Image: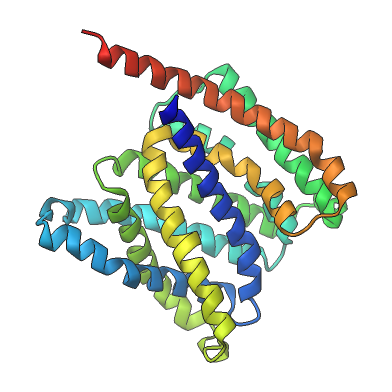
Amino acid sequence: MNHSLSQNFLLLLWVSLMASSFVVSKDLLPYANPIASTGLRFILASILMLPIILRENVWKKNTHLIGKKLIAQYSFISLFLVLFFLGLFEALKTTSAIRTSVIYTLVPLISVILTYTVLKTKTSKTKLLGFILGTIGAIWVLLTVNPESVKLLQWNSGDGIFLAACFSLSMHVMLVKKWGGDVPPAQGAFYIMMIGGIMLIPFLFLFGDLQTIAWQQIQFWKTLLYLTIFTTMATFFLQQYLVQQVGPNRLLAFTYLIPGLVAFAQGAVMPQLWSSLPGIALTLLALHLISRTQISRTQTSSIESEAP
């Protein structure tokens, strides 16, 4: 029980940090464009983590954690994450943030399809119902707290681009599960940030508008450091750890909470919060259904392992 509670706490911490990135990233827009801010976050996070990784690999001589095969695997893992961000930026040229938020709620369902196709992981009917209810609940919250909801029946080219980006994000998390099992969370997070940062460098120089970045503004550095430490380093570390503990599907299921968390963080007015309560209730029910079978299997495995 304590183990499942600690997992749920870490999942809530992870998704809370993820939700804060949606709010805080908006504060960085006056100082740097999205491509520049993302590239800088990856590069700065890699620099900050480098001493930790050097200590683990050089001082402790963990040379088996540095190899061509491992770098190749994490190159693919990072590539799909970079494709997600690039797809998001390109999609926002022809669609709105609220529409991408609605499409983003499909990520857990996409993950179910990919884990079944690639990892041969079957999903029970109870879990599948949970994913469907979670998608409905998250969309409900989005529609009740955002006035742009009336435009959601349209379909723009940016919507298709972001849907492809969501496949990339699901592929990224699934590959972490497939290839990251033997890599410590800090090591895996560092590889993702370092390789992702290298991949983003050309886009940083071509489309980052470096000359317009407000380098001299203290608020720019405060916001960038928060995004770097808490919503990049911490979230990538937690993701590396949790995806091996609970699996990609349950991890991504907690993203159903993001619309509600963002609504509260942005101070949604009471009528909106009241009307979003059914959606929040559906989301919580979905998490219960998705987590219940996972917890049951964990407890069963623990009992079997302790049996003489």
- Is 17 left, or right, of 4 in this rendering? right
Q: Position of residue 56 (x, y in %)?
A: 18, 58
Which residue is nearer to you in this view: 6 or 47?
6
In the picture, the quarter occupied by the N terminus is: top left
Q: Residue furthest right?
A: 271
Q: Position of residue 237 (x, y in %)?
A: 39, 52
Q: Picture quarter containing residue 283?
A: top right
- Is 126 left, or right, of 123 in this rendering? right
Where is 39 relative to 300, above or below? Answer: below
- Is 141 left, or right, of 27 in this rendering? right
- Is 274 left, or right, of 190 in this rendering? right
Q: Residue furthest front?
A: 2
Q: Residue furthest left?
A: 61
| Residue at figure coordinates x 26%, y 14% from the top left | 306
Can residue 165 be seen by looking at this rendering?
yes
Model colouring: rainbow
Which residue is nearer to you in this view: 87 or 288?
288
| Residue at figure coordinates x 27%, y 68% from the top left | 50
Where is 207 relative to 11, above or below? Answer: below
| Residue at figure coordinates x 82%, y 51% from the top left | 145
Q: Position of residue 59 (x, y in %)?
A: 11, 62
| Residue at figure coordinates x 63%, y 41% from the top left | 256
